[in-house]
């Protein structure tokens, strides 16, 4: 873990972030799983697809990425001329960790007639080995553009892959990775909560295992869950994803009750993403001040990874014709 040693006594961190944001011509991008204080000062808060679209089009000189490393890497891949800083370089992801590039490469080589449809929660090296990247909000649109007879490897999230596979009746070879946060929801505790709030719908992220998704009234990405929360008609919603997203729901609908789905002992903090939680206001201030920790990616690798990301951005906006993908 990164240890913050700077003495910030007497420094008004919020005022300094404001000053540095202007001085550096920086844009602060934040994921919905960030702490509320970070969400509230960000220039843009969004899901993985929206954040990569925003990173690709910003005219800022500096992107301060409040999210996890694969997201900041994505910003650098798409905007190499910008300085991209991540407040804590240790902010990783269990899905990325589950998929070492050399093992993924061997898996691909063992299935040469398959294309690799890969979740954005992976390393730059794995992106470079993939045909098209998806996020949870672009996966359905993209999958439907791939010819039915095309064989597919889906990694690294076996739950998102399994959910897509069931929804579209599409066989896929699944990499066995999971998100430790969504894996921690307890079906038993969820059913107890549901019994206390029988009229409350359940909205769940597709990174949840099937025994949680089976109880969901809505399954979708963070932005899609947020949209559902803004439109559902009842008073109470049970939210089966990282609970910091509830901040946006409470801001938009202060009269409604949003309850985070429980983990194994009913009230553990095991559904807070430990990687996202590494970013703090103090580390964001230091990142803007020092322009460190900075994301650097070797150019050949960046270009190789950009291919599959560009494919996602094109296919997600419907600009690529159906059947455009071919096996490697
Ligand atoms: P989305 O915001 O794209 O739904 O992704 C969720 C997530 O787990 C990011 O790590
Ligand atoms: Fe990775 Fe899960 Fe954290 Fe998202 S919530 S960054 S998938 S560990």
Image (cartoon, rainbow, N blue to C red):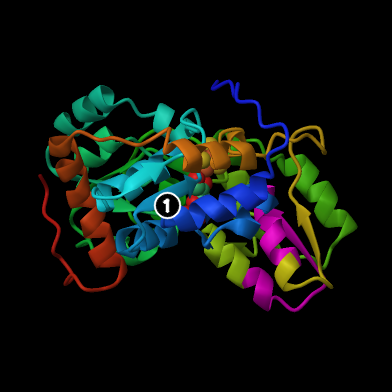
Query: Label 1, on which residue?
Result: 24
Q: Quadrant of residue 234?
A: bottom right
Front residue of 74/112: it is: 74
- Magenta stretch holds residue 295: no
Q: x, y (%) of residue 71? A: 41, 45
Up-down: is 188 above or below 8? below
Q: Which residues are magenta?
A: 228-250
Q: Is residue 302 above or below residue 243?
A: above
Q: Could you tell me residue 213's position as x and y percent?
A: 60, 52
Q: Nearer the viewer, residue 37 or 170?
A: 37
* Residue depicted at 40% across the width and 59% down the height: 49
In the image: residue 121, left or right of residue 213: left
Name the residue at 73% across, 36% down: 10
Tell me the residue at 70%/57% (across/down). 246
Which quarter of the rendering shows the C terminus? top left
| Lateral position of residue 29 relative to residue 266, left or right | left
Residue for point 59% across, 24% down: 4
- Residue 5 on image: x %, y %: 60, 21
Judge by depth and name the residue closer to the eye, 323 or 148: 323
Q: Position of residue 99 (x, y in %)?
A: 36, 29
Q: Is residue 241 magenta?
A: yes
Q: Nearer the viewer, residue 69 or 145?
A: 69
Q: Which structural element holds mark 1?
A: loop
- Residue 306 to residue 221: above or below: above
Q: Is residue 145 visible?
A: no
């Amino acid at each position: 873990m990164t240890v913050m040693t700077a003495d910030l006594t007497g420094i008004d961190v919020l005022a300094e972030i404001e000053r540095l944001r202007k001085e550096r011509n920086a844009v602060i991008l934040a994921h919905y799983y960030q702490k509320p204080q970070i969400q509230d000062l960000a220039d843009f808060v969004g899901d993985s697809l929206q954040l990569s679209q925003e990173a690709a089009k910003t005219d800022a000189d500096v992107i301060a990425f409040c999210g996890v490393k694969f997201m900041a890497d994505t910003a650098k891949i798409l905007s190499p001329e910008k300085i991209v800083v991540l407040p804590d370089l240790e902010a990783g992801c269990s899905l990325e960790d589950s998929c070492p590039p050399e093992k993924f490469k061997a898996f691909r080589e063992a299935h040469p007639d398959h294309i690799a449809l890969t979740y954005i929660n992976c390393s730059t090296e794995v992106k470079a080995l993939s045909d098209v990247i998806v996020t949870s909000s672009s996966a359905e649109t993209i999958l439907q553009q791939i010819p039915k007879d095309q064989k597919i490897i889906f990694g690294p999230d076996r739950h998102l892959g399994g959910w897509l596979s069931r929804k579209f009746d599409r066989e896929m070879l699944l990499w066995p990775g999971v998100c430790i946060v969504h894996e921690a929801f307890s079906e038993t505790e969820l059913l107890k909560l549901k019994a206390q709030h029988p009229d409350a719908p359940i909205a769940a992220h597709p990174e949840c295992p099937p025994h949680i998704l089976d109880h969901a009234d809505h399954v979708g990405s963070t932005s899609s869950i947020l949209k559902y929360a803004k439109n559902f008609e009842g008073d109470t919603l049970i939210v089966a994803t990282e609970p910091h997203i509830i901040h946006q729901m409470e801001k938009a609908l202060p009269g409604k009750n949003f309850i985070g789905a429980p983990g194994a002992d009913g009230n553990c903090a095991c559904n807070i993403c430990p990687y996202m939680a590494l970013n703090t206001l103090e580390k964001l201030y230091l990142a803007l001040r020092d322009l460190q920790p900075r994301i650097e990616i070797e150019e050949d690798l960046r270009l190789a990874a950009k291919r599959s990301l560009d494919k996602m951005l094109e296919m997600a906006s419907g600009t690529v014709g159906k059947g455009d993908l071919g096996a490697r």
